[in-house]
Image: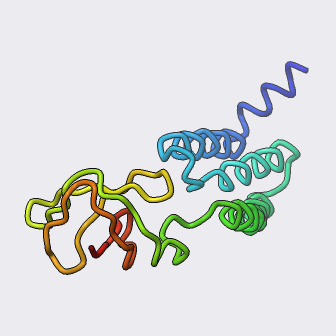
Amino acid sequence: MLDFIKEMVTNSWVIVWAVAFVVFLIVEGVTFNALVSIWFAAASLLAMFAAMAGLGYVWQLAIFTVSSIIFLILTRFIVKKIKKKTPDPTADYDIGKTAIVIEDINNDINEGRAKLDGADWSARSANGSIIHKGETVKVIRIDGSKLIVSA
């Protein structure tokens, strides 16, 4: 057993892939679950196992490359399924609905809030007019996280 561990430590490719694995995990951790490098971390782990098994560098690199692509494709399918389940907050289904102004809307000073379906939104006037608190407005469009409304 000790010989096996000594062989792993002296095999420079095992160390290279282990370091790559750790670096990719750190990058993934720093990006706060943005799925930037998780597939590279998993692929480098597989390449490290290939190095431990004594496969040559070309095979290790091939395993790293192919498994990275496979993990990337699998991740993409998973993310697509997750994204389909979460509704898009800028979807057109809010256009035409009425909202209640809960803070005066004044485009000049970049202020204004409205409540739509129980949710508090930042709001701006479509024509630039000031709309006072308590008025009912109609949603014309959604610009990012802002309702564009008219009185």
| Residue 65 x %, y % | 72, 66
Instruction: Answer yes or no: is residue 58 visible.
Output: no
Question: In the rendered view of the protein, which quadrant contains the N terminus?
Answer: top right
Question: In the rendered view of the protein, which quadrant contains the C terminus?
Answer: bottom left
User: Foreground: 11 or 64?
Assistant: 64
Q: Is residue 100 above or below residue 29?
A: below
Res 36 → quadrant: bottom right
| Residue 48 x %, y % | 76, 45
| Residue 5 x %, y % | 81, 25
Identity of the residue drawn at 31% across and 72% down = 148
Identity of the residue drawn at 73% across and 60% down = 64
| Residue 62 x %, y % | 77, 66
User: Foreground: 42 or 114?
Assistant: 114
Identity of the residue drawn at 67% across and 46% down = 17
Please, which residue is most extreme toward the top here?
2
How many circles with numbers are drawn on the protein? 0
Instruction: Answer yes or no: is residue 17 visible.
Output: yes
Please, which residue is most extreme toward the front here?
135
Res 19 → quadrant: top right
Q: Is residue 25 left or right of residue 60?
A: left
Q: How is the image coloured?
A: rainbow
Q: Is residue 41 above or below residue 105?
A: above
Q: Is residue 65 above or below residue 141?
A: above
Please, which residue is most extreme toward the right here?
1
Identity of the residue drawn at 80% across and 32% down = 7
Q: Is residue 142 left or right of residue 44?
A: left
Res 80 → quadrant: bottom right
